[in-house]
Amino acid sequence: MKRYIKSFLPDFRPVRGTDASFDLQDFEDKDFDCPIKRGEIGVYVISSTDIKYTYPNGKKSPIIYIGMSDDLLRRLKDEHFTKGLKRLIDNPDWGIDKNWQLPSRYQYMYYNGSHIDVFKCRGKQESKEMESMFLNQFYQKYRALPVGNGARSYGKK
């Protein structure tokens, strides 16, 4: 598990670590053998490959966004890559002329890299609960959500 993830999730799967790790831009390569399949459920952490962001308590982290999905491949490839990052790769000024705004996480990914670490749900784990745990532990360490997250996660009741 990468050092920056382990720093806010010290006891989460310490031996095995992530289930998949790749760059979001790998989806551009038609020969890319994606390590996740349709329908897999879990949480993903998107981090910068170039910089670390300074948080309110002065600590730094390269993490841009923490998210969850009940179909990780669809979410990462179809939404984050195709509808988000790829638009900026193809045209860095995408939407400016029409005053359309992409979520800030895509700007961070475009300018600072987009590494993905995936944690698949196991057993009775639910993606929403796992995402809530990740975000809460991130907040406890850095006193803020990742720069690309707009709202905190609400665990299931």
Image (tube, rainbow, N blue to C red):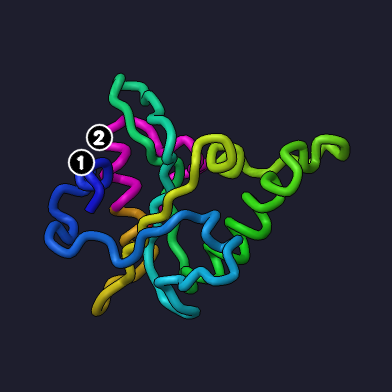
User: What SS does tag 1 mark?
Assistant: loop
Q: Residues within 10 Å of mark 1 (few under 14, many from 20)?
A: some
- Is 107 drawn above or below residue 14 in the view shown? above
Left or right: 111 as drawn, with respect to 102: left
Q: Position of residue 62 (x, y in %)?
A: 37, 36
Amino acid carrying mark 2 in the image: Lys
Q: Residue furthest front?
A: 31
Q: Residue at x 45, y 41 (%)?
A: 64
Q: Nearer the viewer, residue 16 or 141?
A: 16
Q: Which residues are magenta?
A: 134-153
Residue topped by disc 1: 7
Q: Nearer the viewer, residue 27 or 87?
A: 27
Q: Residue at x 47, y 35 (%)?
A: 147
Q: Earlier in the sequence, mark 2 or mark 1?
A: 1
User: What SS does tag 2 mark?
Assistant: helix
Q: Position of residue 73 (x, y in %)?
A: 50, 70
Residue topped by disc 2: 141
Left or right: 139 as drawn, with respect to 100: left
In which quadrant of the rendered image does the C terminus lie?
bottom left
Q: Are marks 2 and 1 in contact (CB under 8 Å)?
A: yes
How many numbered callouts?
2
